[in-house]
Image (cartoon, grey):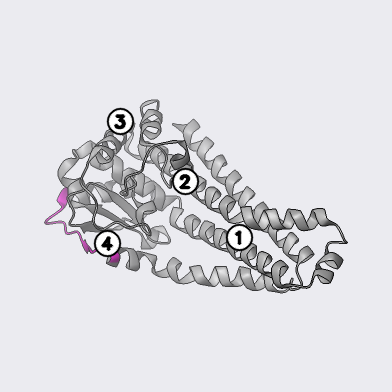
Amino acid sequence: MYEQIGSNIWRSRGLIAFFLALIIGLGYLFAKTTDYPEILPIAVIFAILSSIGSYYYSDRIVLAMSRARPATREEHAHLVNSVEGLALAAGIPAPRIYVIDDSAPNAFATGRDPNRAVICVTTGLLEKLNRLELEGVIGHEMAHIRDYDIRLVTLVAVLAGTAVLISDWLLRSMWWGSGVSRRRRTGGSPIVLLVAIVAAILAPLAATLIQLAISRSREYLADAQGAMLTRYPDGLADALEKIAADTEPLEAANKATAHMYIVNPLKDIGGPLNALFSTHPPIEERVRRLHAM
């Protein structure tokens, strides 16, 4: 269990470091090959500002989109008790609890920090999972909250948006800019110009892949830390299998919110290429790792 946690932490750090190196490299090429290097800081500022609104209001937006309602102790006593007990074990304030009236089992966490966190579950999850499986799911979501994963996801979104903006402006500047000026900036080297063009084309794809890899890495980490909270990895493993095997569609989910759920509610088509572009790791591998703890 400790090995899984340590491995996933370092994998996440490595991916973010690579992401930052990608942004710095794009910025360098932008300054070297375009007529408008002063646009670079504008791109960075724009990407940051565009994410501030979603960062501060994401919980309200997602809950409204999902048509979630607050849970009550009278109606959902076991759910409330489980959340409060695992919050105490995690050493964080008890999150607010919401319920989505949907027969498909699933859950997600949102909120920018533990003091403003929300755990939301579907009625299908409460009906189809037993006590140990439900606690496994709550432990997973509690780990996301304790690790500030919503904040990390926002940071990664800013980096991805910045990479896309720089790449787009780099291509536009080289296309519409002066050829003489480009040659002067690159020192007359066609190699630098070629590298800049290739980087501008491939950087958005690379940014997306890194963003998705970080998302998958954080899911593995939340699995391991959630199992640490409950001290029963098999509960979460069984829950993941049940959720993944359920054939009912989650009507409240869409492409904008699918990455937040413990299991992707938009059913994936299998294959290695799909795994590369998925926000969630394969269920089989998550279950295997949990059973190995």
Taking the image as shown, residue 12 lies to the left or right of residue 224, namely right
Residue, disc 3 = 234
Q: Give yes or no for contact between labels 1 and 4 (Cβ–Cβ under 8 Å).
A: no
For residue 277, the mark is: 2
Amino acid residing under circle 4: Ser
Q: Give yes or no for contact between labels 2 and 1 (Cβ–Cβ under 8 Å).
A: no
**Residue 62: quadrant of the picture:** bottom left
Q: Residue at x 43, y 47 (%)?
A: 279
Amino acid residing under circle 3: Asp
Q: CA distance from mark 2 to mark 4?
A: 24 Å
Q: Residue at x 72, y 64 (%)?
A: 30
Q: Residues within 10 Å of mark 2 (few under 14, many from 20)?
A: some
For residue 163, the mark is: 1
Q: Which residues are magenta?
A: 65-78
Q: Residues within 10 Å of mark 3 (few under 14, many from 20)?
A: many
| SS type, badge 2 | loop
Relative height, residue 42 to residue 234 (above, below): below
Taking the image as shown, residue 78 lies to the left or right of residue 47, namely left
For residue 51, the mark is: none
Residue, disc 4 = 66
